[in-house]
Amino acid sequence: MKSTEYSEKVLDHFRSPRNTGTLEGDDIAVGRVGNPVCGDLMEIYIKVSDGRIEDIKFRTFGCGSAIATASMITELAKGKTLEEAMKITRQDVANELDGLPPVKMHCSNLAADALKNAIDNYRHNHAPGIEDSPTQSRCPDKIINQDRFTGNGVFGSVETERLRGKRVLVVDTGESSVAAARQASEVAPRVVFLTKKKERETEPGIMEKLRAAGVKTLFESEIVEFVGFTVLEQVLVHDLNEDNKYELFTDAVILICPCR
């Protein structure tokens, strides 16, 4: 990390991170978030007593900014009620660190999301009778250039021979798309499952199946455009969490829409 790009507070929390490690016990909850594109992964553990965060720890696999933001958010959350901690924003984290470079703001977003995920998990596990209500998958609206690449990079089913050795992206449209991702992983070296859902809205059983098949998942994402010269080369993805767009290279997209 170059000192000219980061504040002294960022450097301090990077060099001497607070509250590292894990926690165990019945009153512990864990929040896990990640971004498969940049590779940052984060876990935040909270111990709750009388509605307050009595203790908090973190583990992260990411850049120096990810470490610094995780360290700072644990300091901000410790001692607060769950309601107060839920209100901590990524901007709060960045402000307490005296700012972050714009390209690193996603790190503070990751830390805030991991904390909120931990609180959600605690509330769910300690409030019997409250059930998750996952966002229902549905066929997406027609994507730019979809007609142009249908059958030429965009497929409505798993065409095994045409996917062999390819980089495959599967759009979440329900149970059939999960099965398609697992089937594609048998012939494709890289399969990514793209869903508009948040990680906590996805059934654990589905995630276990995808992970077992070696399929990576992009949460809170949607395709807005198919791009290529004569064949599909990449897709333009809208990150619904950070509200930005980025290009993702792929050879094939599986988009199963039985509702059409």
Image: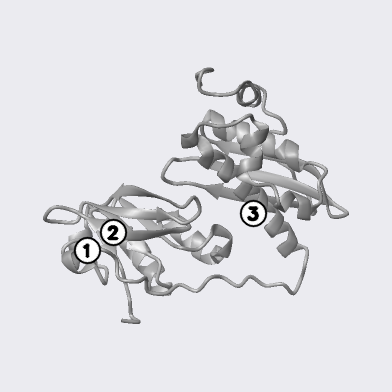
Tell me whether the residue at label 2 lies in contact with that at label 3, contact meaning CB atoms closer than 8 angstroms: no
Identify the residue at image location x=43%, y=73%.
175
Mark 3 sits on what residue?
117
Q: In what element is the residue under mark 2?
A: strand
Residue 132 location in percent, x, y? 63, 70
Amino acid under label 1? Asn
Amino acid under label 2? Glu
- Give the numbered dot on residue 145: 1
Amino acid under label 3? Asn
Q: Nearer the viewer, residue 115 or 86?
A: 86
Residue 211 location in percent, x, y? 46, 55
The tally of labels here is 3
Q: In what element is the residue under mark 3?
A: helix
Tell me whether the residue at label 1 lies in contact with that at label 2, contact meaning CB atoms closer than 8 angstroms: yes
Asked whether residue 215 is in view, the answer is no
Mark 2 sits on what residue?
225
Within 10 Å of disc 2 (Cα), the crowding (few <14, some 14-19, many 20+) is some
Q: Is residue 84 left or right of residue 145?
A: right
Q: In the image as oriented, which residue stretches furthest toward the top? A: 3
